[in-house]
Image (tube, rainbow, N blue to C red):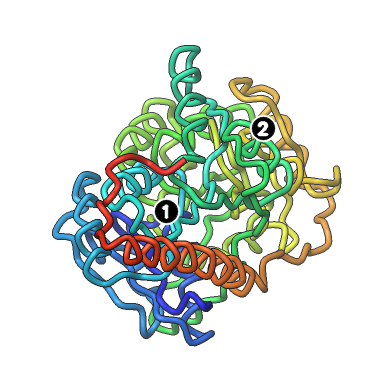
Amino acid sequence: MAATHILTYAQDLAGGGVERAQLRLARGWLAAGRRVTLAIGDASGPLASEIPPGLEIVPLGNRGYLTQARIADWVRKHDPDVIFCGGSHYTLVAAWLRWRLGADCPPIVGKLSNAVTRGDHGRVADAAHRLWLAQHGRFLDHLVAMTPATAAQAARLTGMQRRTSVIPNPPAPRIVDPTAPAIPLPPGRVVLGVGRLVPQKRWDRLIAALPLMPDDVQVVILGEGELRGALERQAREAGLANRVHLPGHVADPIAAMAAARVLALPSDYEGVPGVLRESLSVGTPVVSTACSPSVREIVSSPTFGTVVAADDPTVFAAALTRWLDAPRPDPVAQPGSDSADRYLMLFDRLAGEVRASQKARRGAYAGAGTLPVPATQPLS
């Protein structure tokens, strides 16, 4: 049975990697003739221009996380064939849908978007997070990770060894918009950062490393977020305001990546950071913290860049300085050109299995002359 109708959901289109990948996948599913619905709290934002034609939008009213609870009523009414949980941030919604819909819940496929071991967690938070991961097999029918290393780690911690697949995110399409303003890089050698201005990304580490690099080096961070004021203040107080540039969100950062000397990723934790692959695809080396098992899978050769430990600005600055004038790597092709099709094969198989099970169950109830009582507990 084909999964002809796919539902996915998000809070907003503020520029996160999860939502960007959702829209890319939706574009591929629509091109394959499937119906795709996005339930979303706020459909405005920097990624709104990337909404593919034909994507059905279900407005939830506001971007609050709890608003996602409304999705359950929509699912009961419209009965999609599969639900796609686009990232780790949204798994609690998946658990709610399974509990609320019970045996009538469509199959739920969840994608792992963050590292299963978080760099910002202490001992207590880490234990709680591991306990939460161990519950995933109760509400997810299948788990998708983006690299073999993250898949192996996630399968072990979730207990979903036989229900985990590896499917990379689709590569970023080039966005050609003649009306979009160019992003001129400042004079001098540029260290580029690309990502939201949020605590996870730890752009403060990059700014703290800048005084340890040559005076002509400039830092440009493409992104927007809640920490803009704090980062601007950090640069100003360190006397670096003329060397730290925050132009905001850019729909297509590839041109800036190609022009920069090196791309920096100082995060506490990541899933599979697409910016590393995008940078390497245009031959720009990368320096990243060891924020995910996938980082060393991507930076698989010493000619691609350097992976460093977190919280050592001297080592971070030394690695960045080395790559300012080092030979650039040859461009590395991004994986994932067939990712949308691989998801559809998975969706079709799961939809067929679940629909057959539901049909058999309803037939059994009909033969007994009784009606089923909706389940109110998570499925095991």
Q: What residue lies at 36% left-to-right and 43% top-to-bottom?
A: 95
Q: Which mark is residue 246?
A: none
SS type, badge 2: loop
Say whether residue 50 is left or right of residue 220.
left
When asked about the image quadrant of residue 154, the answer is top right
Please name the amino acid that badge 1 sits on.
Gly
- Percent x, y of residue 247: 40, 55
Please name the amino acid that badge 2 sits on.
Ala
Q: What residue lies at 39% left-to-right and 67% top-to-bottom?
A: 363
Judging depth in this view, the residue of 49 and 161 nearest the camera is: 161
Q: Residue furthest left?
A: 61
Tell me if residue 11 can be seen.
yes
Tell me if residue 250 can be seen.
no
Say whether residue 114 is left or right of residue 318.
left
Residue at the disc numbered 1: 16
Sort mark 2 into few (<14), some (14-19) or many (20+) by Cα contacts within 10 Å. many
- Percent x, y of residue 215: 61, 36
Considering only order in the chain, which callout, 2 or 1, is on the residue closer to the N terminus?
1
In three-dimensional space, the C-alpha distance between marks 1 and 2, rounded to whole angstroms, equals: 20 Å
Judging depth in this view, the residue of 210 and 311 nearest the camera is: 311
Q: Is residue 309 above or below residue 78?
A: above
- Find out whether the residues at labels 1 and 2 contact each other: C-beta distance under 8 Å: no
- Percent x, y of residue 196: 42, 47
Say whether residue 314 is left or right of residue 56.
right
- Percent x, y of residue 370: 25, 59
Residue at the disc numbered 2: 290
Q: What residue lies at 47% left-to-right and 65% top-to-bottom?
A: 183
SS type, badge 1: loop
Q: What residue lies at 53% left-to-right and 30% top-to-bottom?
A: 268
Q: Residue furthest top?
A: 123
Q: Is residue 129 above or below residue 216?
A: above
